[in-house]
Image (spheres, rainbow, N blue to C red):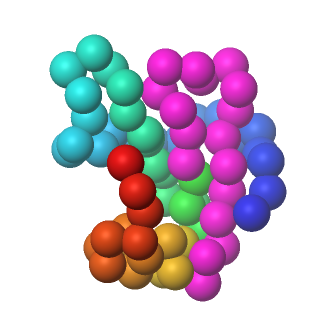
Amino acid sequence: MALASREGLCWKKSSYSGSQGECVEVAVLSDQMAVRDSKNLDSGHLVFGGAEWSTFLRTLKGGGFCA
């Protein structure tokens, strides 16, 4: 995972976003995924490699994160 500064990314908002704009947005890079907090855009975004992103999604789908 690396902190990155990239302009012109096409951000997609989570379909689970709260009505008050509390959400995570993702953008597809060539072989990575960028993730940012939509309510704090000045903080930049994180970039995850393919293996890291796959592990994150598997953990998320398996209920591995607590709310």
Tally of numbered discs: 0
The picture places residue 54, in percent across and down from the top left corner, at 48, 80
Q: Is residue 2 left or right of residue 42?
A: right
- Measured as percent of width and height from the top left, residue 19 is found at 20, 20
27 with respect to 17 (left or right)? right
In the picture, residue 15 is in which quadrant? top left
Quarter where residue 65 is shown: bottom left
Is residue 19 at least partly visible in the picture? yes
- Whether residue 50 is visible here, answered yes or no, is no
Residue lying farthest to the front in this orientation: 66
**Horizontal arrangement in the rendering, residue 13 relative to residue 19 (left or right):** right
**Which quarter of the rendering shows the N terminus?**
bottom right
Q: Could you tell me which residue is drawn at 79 percent across and 48 percent down?
A: 3
Left or right: 13 with respect to 40?
left
Q: Is residue 32 above or below residue 28?
A: below
- Residue 31, above or below 25: below
Q: Estimate the x, y position of residue 5 in percent, counting from the top left.
A: 76, 39
Q: Residue at x 79, y 57 (%)?
A: 2
Residue 20, placed above or below residue 50: above
Residue lying at 41% horizontally and 71% vertically, measured from the top left: 64
Toward the top, the furthest residue is: 20
Residue at left offset 43%, top offset 41%: 25
Q: Is residue 45 above or below residue 30?
A: above
Residue 56 colored in magenta in the image: no
> Percent x, y for residue 11?
43, 40
Instruction: Please state the extent of the stretch shown in magenta in the rendering.
Output: 35-52
